[in-house]
Amino acid sequence: MLRQKVRGAGMASLRRPPWLVVVLSRWPAPGRCKRRLAHAIHPVAAATIQSRLLIHVLFLIQPLVKEGLVHLHLAVTGAGRKAWRRWLAALGYSTRGTSLNQQGGGNLGCRMARQVRWGLARHYRGVVLLGSDCLGLETDDLRRALQLLSSGEKPLVLGPAQDGGYWLMGQRCFDACLFSGLPWGSNRVGVLTKTRACASGFQVHTLRVRSDVDRVQDLQPWLAALVGSPKATCDGGRCTSVRNPGW
């Protein structure tokens, strides 16, 4: 009996833990998120878009969670954990199986670094950071990122954004050079991150270019696809033909 217990414990210890996918998000309240977009459209509309983008991202990750490939962690700011869980439940998203915690203080680099170190300290195989602003994100993008992270000794996966940043970062080891001293919010972040990563010995892999939703123009592809007509536009701070988004 004792031998069986020891053998079972050994097999459990050899089982590789899943990957950790961290989604970083702000509290979707008017005036507290999507500020650049809110300048062009009503702050309430911008907050609504933020909330739907977040739910869109969370549901896309669920197939990987059910397959046992990833654990989903939601890193939030702007409200407490109980408020976040109530808000998500009201939108039909169950947080069962999803861990949730505050991002903590500091600039974006500090908050991202904190999540990577948190995940690696808990012996996940690697950590994938995601924003909640990518309109075109697909589950296959995440599958591809995990495949690339499984190769090489020191891989780094970046999902480049059209604005010069990135919508995904995945890694198996922590390096502070990827998070400190970068001009966050500028169009140089992606290039500088890749340059630093190569200098530090990372094997850098890139996914397809995606667009974050920061401006009214970023909504145009989705609006056109929604109604199948170029007449779906945002003009003068008012979005037309936005019905049943289905996110």
Image (cartoon, rainbow, N blue to C red):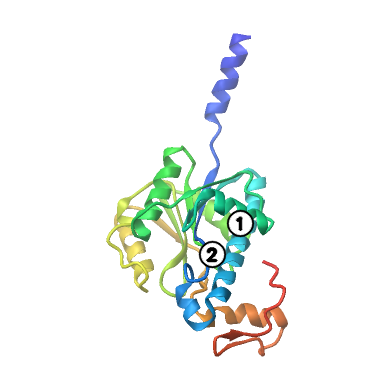
The Cα atoms of the two marked residues, 1 and 2, are separated by 10 Å
Q: Which residue is drawn at 55% across and 42% down?
A: 18
Q: 10 Å neighbourhood of mark 2: few (<14), some, or many (≥20)? A: many
Q: Mark 1 points at which residue?
A: 87
- For this rendering, which residue is in front, 194 or 34? 34
In this view, 228 is above or below 185: below
Residue tagged 2 = 28
Which element carries disc 1, helix, strand or loop?
Answer: helix
Residue kind at label 1, given as amino acid type: Trp
Residue toward you, 94 or 176: 94
Give residue 53's quadrant in the image: bottom right
Q: Are marks 1 and 2 in contact (CB under 8 Å)?
A: yes
Amino acid identity at mark 2: Pro
Residue 13: mark:
none
Which quadrant of the view contains residue 67?
top right
Q: Where is residue 20 in the image (x, y as percent from the top left)?
A: 52, 47
Q: Residue most toward the top?
A: 1
Quadrant where the N terminus sits is: top right
Residue 150 is left or right of residue 60, and the answer is left
* Residue 30, horizontal then vertical, whole percent: 52, 70
